[in-house]
Amino acid sequence: MQLEQIILGIPVLLLAISIHEFAHGYAAHKLGDPTPASQGRLTLNPLAHLDPLGALMLLVFRFGWARPVLVNPMYFRNRQRGMVFVAVAGPLANLLLAWVFYVCLAFVLPLVPMFAGHAAVQLFCLTGVQLNLGLAAFNLLPVPPLDGSKILGGMLPSRYAHHYQRYAQYGPLVLILLLMTGTAQMVLSPIYLVLLRIITVFG
């Protein structure tokens, strides 16, 4: 990876993480949960959301995670549906942000006359697309404690959801194995490509 791309990726990374976790917190807040607000997570300040290892993974490997926003589903009128909404909010926010970067890269920049930093802005937008899609794709994996596991758990019938949650404690181990064996990239690639297809169709 080019040094320039790493440098330009830092502000994109901080924005992607902040948007992702803020979206989780805001969704929970709108559903009646005061927990994110009480923990200072209803903010776009990246320092409130940053997980150093997850951020490094995202910057280098294009998939990673942030510090999770804690929510209390007891406040939701419908706990199961509420958790699905909260879980979806993070990846959806990154998908929308990736779309914004894509539109700037594919449609806005070509209309702008060439200027001194044109190539750097192009690389910045490309990095914005890659990092946001990577963060969304990784979090959509149905492995606890990622968002995908909460989405799947919320959509399963109660009897199946209970059995699914019993295996949540093994989720971090599964993630470590996926990352160490390189299987994560194989699993993530189809998800990433689907998300990329979505933003290009609507771009």
Image (tube, grey):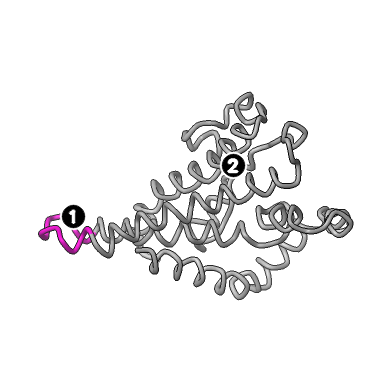
Q: Earlier in the sequence, mark 2 or mark 1?
A: 2
Numbered range of the magenta stretch: 108-119
For the point 63% across and 44% down, the residue is: 86
For the point 64% across and 34% down, the residue is: 31
Expressed as whole percent of the image width and height from the top left, the position of residue 61 reads 52, 63
Which residue, given by chain and number where applicable, does mark 1 sit on? 117
Work out how far the residue at label 2 is from the one at label 1, CA to CA, in angstroms. 34 Å
Whether the magenta-drawn stretch holds residue 107 is answered as: no
Closer to us: 143 or 62: 143
Label 1 environment density (alpha carbons within 10 Å; few <14, some 14–19, many ≥20): few
Instruction: Identify the amino acid type marked 1.
Output: Gly
Determine the image quadrant of residue 151.
bottom right
Closer to us: 1 or 187: 187
Specify whether 16 is left or right of 123: right
Specify whether 20 is left or right of 31: left
Instruction: Identify the amino acid type marked 2.
Output: His
| SS category of the residue bearing label 2 | helix
For the point 65% across and 62% down, the residue is: 141
Which residue, given by chain and number where applicable, does mark 2 sit on? 24
Image quarter where the N terminus lies is bottom left
